[in-house]
């Protein structure tokens, strides 16, 4: 190993974040498209009655946050130019703002 190699612990942590963010995207899109929460998640999360009526709002927000996390980790795991990494960070921040806007403004 050379001093410029990344720490294996940080690389493993980033890979776990990527896997979790992909799961968030898949789960959020599934909830938003089917407009239903999985029954197992309803038992674990103990959603209130008002939250149960808003699957598109919660699923879409979760999918956008998952995409934000995924884009934040991409420059650390894939070799890319500095400007491309900064651009992905800006897009990730825009996705975070879009997720907050989606959650606040999208009401049924």
Image (cartoon, rainbow, N blue to C red):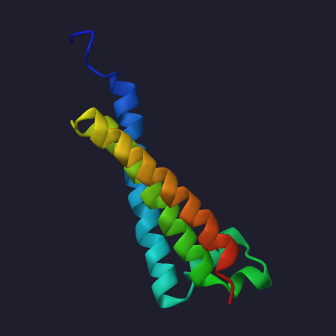
- The answer to whether residue 15 is visible is no
Name the spot of residue 7 as percent of width and height, x first: 34, 21
Q: Residue drawn at (54%, 67%), measured in percent from left and top? A: 62
Rendered image quadrant of residue 6:
top left
Residue 33 drawn at (x, y percent): 46, 86
Position of residue 81 relative to residue 6, above or below, is below
**Which residue is at 40% across, 70% downward?**
26
Q: Nearer the viewer, residue 29 or 79?
A: 79
Point out residue 13 in the picture as x, y percentages from the top left corner.
Answer: 42, 36
| Along the viewing direction, whichever of 12 and 72 lies nearer the viewer | 72
Seen in the picture, residue 88 relative to 42 is either above or below; the reply is above
Please state, as top left, top right, bottom left or bottom right, where the N terminus lies in the image. Answer: top left
Residue lying at 44% horizontally and 76% vertically, measured from the top left: 29
Pick the front one: 87 or 3:
87
Residue 18, given in percent of the width and then of the height, sits at 38, 49
Residue 15 vertical position relative to residue 45 in the rendered view, above or below: above
Where residue 91 sits, quadrant-wise, is bottom left
Give the residue drawn at x 73%, y 76%.
47
Could you tell whether 2 is left or right of 8 in the image? left
Residue found at the far top of this picture: 3
The quarter in which the C terminus is drawn is bottom right
The number of callouts visible is 0
Q: Could one spot residue 104 in this view of the protein?
A: yes
In the image, 40: left or right of 30? right
Above or below, 53 relative to 5: below
Residue extending furthest right?
49
- Residue in front for this viewpoint, 37 or 39: 37
């Amino acid at each position: 190993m050379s001093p410029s190699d990344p720490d294996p612990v940080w690389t493993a942590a980033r890979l776990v974040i990527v896997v979790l963010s992909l799961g968030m995207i898949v789960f959020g899109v599934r909830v938003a498209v089917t407009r239903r929460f999985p029954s197992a998640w309803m038992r674990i999360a103990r959603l209130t009655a008002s939250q149960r009526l808003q699957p598109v709002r919660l699923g879409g927000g979760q999918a956008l946050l998952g995409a934000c996390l995924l884009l934040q980790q991409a420059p650390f795991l894939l070799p890319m130019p500095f400007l491309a990494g900064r651009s992905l960070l800006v897009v990730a921040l825009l996705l975070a703002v879009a997720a907050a806007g989606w959650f606040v403004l999208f009401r049924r």
